[in-house]
Image (cartoon, grey):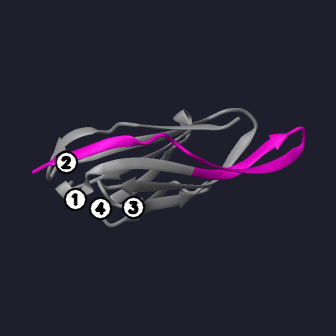
């Protein structure tokens, strides 16, 4: 079974930076794509940034996604934080599990980590 967990959220002041981490754990799996989403209070979940499993770094505006191979993690760094960045940030991993030599696709979400930006 593959599990995904986010960490690094918290309360930060506007203008600062924050790094969130998404760690995938389990056995016999590979990640094809990792995406970060967020859900602002009272709004729907929205895509923030993403990167293929073969990628190292991806930049989308103020959002930088990077891979930490040693920790099997994908990080999201947010620069110049704004109050509108407040929300729960989720990581989604899609990939394949090897179960007795059969490749089974998976699509797994973490539980989310809260980011609150104060003005």
Please tell me whether mark 1 or mark 4 is closer to you in this view.
1
Identify the secondary structure beneath mark 3: loop
Pick out the residue farthest to the right. 101
Identify the secondary structure beneath mark 1: helix
Residue shown at the point (22%, 59%) measured from the top left: 84
Q: Residue 60 location in percent, x, y? A: 38, 66
Identify the secondary structure beneath mark 4: loop
Position of 80 compared to 41: left or right? Answer: left
In the picture of the structure, the residue carrying the numbered disc 3 is 44
The Cα atoms of the two marked residues, 1 and 4, are separated by 13 Å
The Cα atoms of the two marked residues, 1 and 2, are separated by 8 Å
Q: Which numbered dot is residue 117?
A: 2
Q: Can residue 82 be seen in this view?
A: no
Mark closer to the chain start, 4 or 3? 3
Q: Is the magenta stretch mostly helix, strand or loop?
A: strand
In the picture of the structure, the residue carrying the numbered disc 4 is 62
Q: What stretch is highlighted in magenta?
A: 93-119
Residue shown at the point (32%, 67%) measured from the top left: 61
Mark closer to the chain start, 1 or 4? 4
Mark closer to the chain start, 4 or 2? 4
Circle 1 residues within 10 Å: few <14, some 14–19, many ≥20: few
Is 4 in the magenta?
no
Mark closer to the chain start, 1 or 2? 1
């Amino acid at each position: 079974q593959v599990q995904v967990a986010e960490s690094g959220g918290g309360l930060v002041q506007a203008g600062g930076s924050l790094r969130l981490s998404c760690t995938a754990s389990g056995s016999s799996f590979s990640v094809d794509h990792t995406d970060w989403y967020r859900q602002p209070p009272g709004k729907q979940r929205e895509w923030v940034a993403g990167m293929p499993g073969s990628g190292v770094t991806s930049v989308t505006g103020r959002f930088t996604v990077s891979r930490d191979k040693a920790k099997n993690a994908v990080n999201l760094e947010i620069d110049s934080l704004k109050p509108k960045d407040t929300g729960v940030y989720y990581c989604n991993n899609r990939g394949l599990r090897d179960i007795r030599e059969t490749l089974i696709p998976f699509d797994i979400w973490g539980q989310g980590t809260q980011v609150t930006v104060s003005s």
